[in-house]
Amino acid sequence: MKRKGILIVVSGFSGAGKGTLMKELLKRYDNYALSVSMTTRQPREGEVDGESYFFVDKETFEKTIENDGLIEYASYCGNYYGTPREYVERCLENGLDVILEIEIQGALKVKGKFPEALLLFVMPPDAAELKRRLEDRGTESPEVIRQRLARASEEADGIEKYEYLIINDDLDECVREMNDIINAARKAPVRNRRMIADMRSQLNAVVKGE
Ligand code: 5GP
């Protein structure tokens, strides 16, 4: 029986290094697919439409919501962000583990709809490091950096709702650790309902002497 992929939600404060971490994970292991989100935010320098995000206007985003084209969406620092449904469902059916790199409101919506989704939270070693990474990135104005740090402080209140914390200190170690956590989580009964149901019916058949 072909296994269905699992849904992995990765959140973390802006500047926690999630993007780099995901890129490295996909480079090293071939069982992952990264969902490309839709957003109304303006592209940053170097971002490519269809790779970093699908960059759309507000009207297109709202139309996609109406057509039930998104698994979830949220508003973050004045812009919409959402996960297109079709790609995610197709990858899961094909046995790929799909990663959604999304913020906390969206993460909780996904968990509500898909209780077997695995929720991971990436944190930098400390808050000063977070501020430094955001400033060094040089892509946001001081005002946007301030908004993102304020949002990080709000999101910190919800961290306990995630299943595992990933401290992004050493990239190499962090990628390995993340893959190990996902492999272990795959063995949880909640993610193996089909196999458990099969085992039950086989046992019943054995008991009845069929
Ligand atoms: P950024 O503007 O830095 O690319 O992303 C801002 C925040 O939006 C990040 O926390 C990122 O994880 C989150 N985000 C990106 N795509 C989505 C999405 O499809 N849905 C939700 N809910 N959040 C997203």
Image: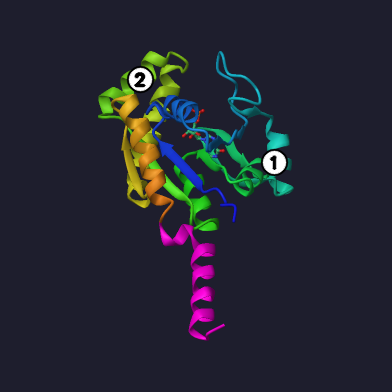
Q: Which residues are magenta?
A: 188-210
Image location (x, y in percent) of residue 18: 42, 30
Say what secondary structure mark 2 lies in: helix
- Identify the disc placed on residue 127: none
Residue 12 belongs to magenta span: no
- Looking at the picture, tell me which residue is in the foreground, 144 or 184: 184
- Density class for disc 2 (Cα within 10 Å; few <14, some 14-19, many ≥20) is some
Horizontally, residue 194 falls left or right of residue 21, namely right
Q: Identify the image's colour scheme: rainbow, by chain, secondary structure or one colour.
A: rainbow
Residue beneath the point at 72% across and 48% down: 66
Residue beneath the point at 52% across and 49% down: 6
For the residues bearing labels 2 and 1, Cβ distance under 8 angstroms = no
Please tell me in which quadrant of the rendered image residue 167 appears.
top left
Q: Amino acid at mark 1?
A: Glu
Q: Is residue 18 above or below residue 11?
A: above
Q: CA distance from mark 2 to mark 1?
A: 32 Å
Horizontally, residue 193 falls left or right of residue 51, namely left
Image location (x, y in percent) of residue 23: 48, 26
Provide the residue designation for mark 1.
62
Dominant SS in magenta:
helix
Provide the residue designation for mark 2.
133
Image location (x, y in percent) of residue 129: 28, 23
Q: Amino acid at mark 2?
A: Arg
Q: Is residue 141 above or below residue 26?
A: above
